[in-house]
Image (spheres, rainbow, N blue to C red):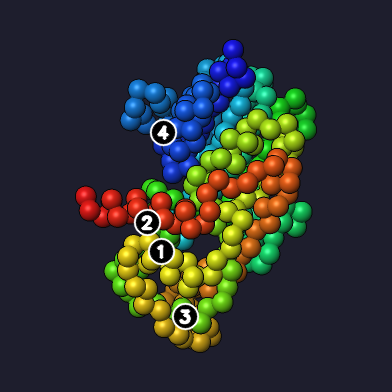
């Protein structure tokens, strides 16, 4: 029996953007997969309901070698919760640590936690050794979960691997990246031609491939890694690439950066504007060096695959 055939992986958030792709890859590569979801849509899934600090995982963790914890209360630009930090802590911190404790007690060998680059802040050139700089409730809850996980694994035999990806794109993408694709597809004129930023992203296929390594590679134990495609891109260049993949002409024109930021303030969309204008570059070299990983997809290939998916969805 191969190591893969002997390895059982429990995946939380298995219906999600990343979770679904990871489960498909695990199954294709011969792993036994426990797909944990809120409500079942397939016979291969197991319903766990809303993950909380009180969720009982004991039965589901029996026989599991590895946990890939992807489920989370995702970042919301305009959160309407009465106490956003409390809500994020419930789902992303306390629920995560509850799962980790039970996984440790069940003899799980490794716990892989999908965190976020937002733990490192919103801008600049960042590496995993830089001091964390979480700036919103989502990022704070992720950072607190990371710290709690290290405390749990320091007192047990279970290994921890923490991954902090930047924006993830690919077939099935939603939120801001999908919105950007739609803007380009509809020919919306965008005043971003004078923007000269650099941002790291990661294609879904690259993230899944990195997760596959993090689940089993001995050198990853106890480490925190930042991930990306290894190619950074400016916002105007990204829009031009998306336009080319869609067979569209990107309509870019210029406005001074100060004016753009003022428009963001006046419209109540400062955070969105800052992401379009600012730089956030991620150092993926430590993960590549330690594991020998090379992203299997280039940025160009990732954008092309995402555009192909979007065209299919648009035509339905």
Residue at left offset 55%, top offset 57%: 201
Whichever of labels 4 and 3 marks the residue nearer the N terminus, that label is: 4
Q: Could one spot residue 152 in this view of the protein?
A: no
- SS at mark 2 in the image: helix
Q: Which mark is on residue 242?
A: 1
Whichever of labels 3 and 2 marks the residue nearer the N terminus, that label is: 3
Location of residue 96 in the rendering, given as x and y in whole percent from the top left corner:
59, 37
- SS at mark 3 in the image: loop
Establish if 256 lies above or below 170.
Answer: below
Quick check: 81 left or right of 220?
A: left
Residue at left offset 50%, top offset 44%: 205
**Proximity of marks 4 and 2: CB atoms separated by less than 8 Å:** no
Q: Local crowd at mark 3 within 10 Å, few (<14), some, or many (≥20)?
A: some
Q: Give the distance between the C-alpha atoms of the residues marked 4 and 2, in whole angstroms.
A: 29 Å
Q: Which mark is on residue 193?
A: 3
Establish if 92 lies above or below 251.
Answer: above
Residue at left offset 45%, top offset 85%: 254
**Proximity of marks 2 and 1: CB atoms separated by less than 8 Å:** yes
Establish if 294 lies above or below 82.
Answer: above
Q: Nearer the viewer, residue 201 or 224?
A: 201
Location of residue 19 in the rendering, given as x and y in whole percent from the top left corner:
47, 38
Q: Give the distance between the C-alpha atoms of the residues marked 1 and 3, in whole angstroms.
A: 15 Å
The residue that disc 2 covers is: 307
- SS at mark 1 in the image: helix
Location of residue 284 in the rendering, given as x and y in whole percent from the top left corner:
67, 52
Which residue is the extreme one toward the left? 316
Quick check: 163 left or right of 19?
A: right
The residue that disc 4 covers is: 38
């Amino acid at each position: 029996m191969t190591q893969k055939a002997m390895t059982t992986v429990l995946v939380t958030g298995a219906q999600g953007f990343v979770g679904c792709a990871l489960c498909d890859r695990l199954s294709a590569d011969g792993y036994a997969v426990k797909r944990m979801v809120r409500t079942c849509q397939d016979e291969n899934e197991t319903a766990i309901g809303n993950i909380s600090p009180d969720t009982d995982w004991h039965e589901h963790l029996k026989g599991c070698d590895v946990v890939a914890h992807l489920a989370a209360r995702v970042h919301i630009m305009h959160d309407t919760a009465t106490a956003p930090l409390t809500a994020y802590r419930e789902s992303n911190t306390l629920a995560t640590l509850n799962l980790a404790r039970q996984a440790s007690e069940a003899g799980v060998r490794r716990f892989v936690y999908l965190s976020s680059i937002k733990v490192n802040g919103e801008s600049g050139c960042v590496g995993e050794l830089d001091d964390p700089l979480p700036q919103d409730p989502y990022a704070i809850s992720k950072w607190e979960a990371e710290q709690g996980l290290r405390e749990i694994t320091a007192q047990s035999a279970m290994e921890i691997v923490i991954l902090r990806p930047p924006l993830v794109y690919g077939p099935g993408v939603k939120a801001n990246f999908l919105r950007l694709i739609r803007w380009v597809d509809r020919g919306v004129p965008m005043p971003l031609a004078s923007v000269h930023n650099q941002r790291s992203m990661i294609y879904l296929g690259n993230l899944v491939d990195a997760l596959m390594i993090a689940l089993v590679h001995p050198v990853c134990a106890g480490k925190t890694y930042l991930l990306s495609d290894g190619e950074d891109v400016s916002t105007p260049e990204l829009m031009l690439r998306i336009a080319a993949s869609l067979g569209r002409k990107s309509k870019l024109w210029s406005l001074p950066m100060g004016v753009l930021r003022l428009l963001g303030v006046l419209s109540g969309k400062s955070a969105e504007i800052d992401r379009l204008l600012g730089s956030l570059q991620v150092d993926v070299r430590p993960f590549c060096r330690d594991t020998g990983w090379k992203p299997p997809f280039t940025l160009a290939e990732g954008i092309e695959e995402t555009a192909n998916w979007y065209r299919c969805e648009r035509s339905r």
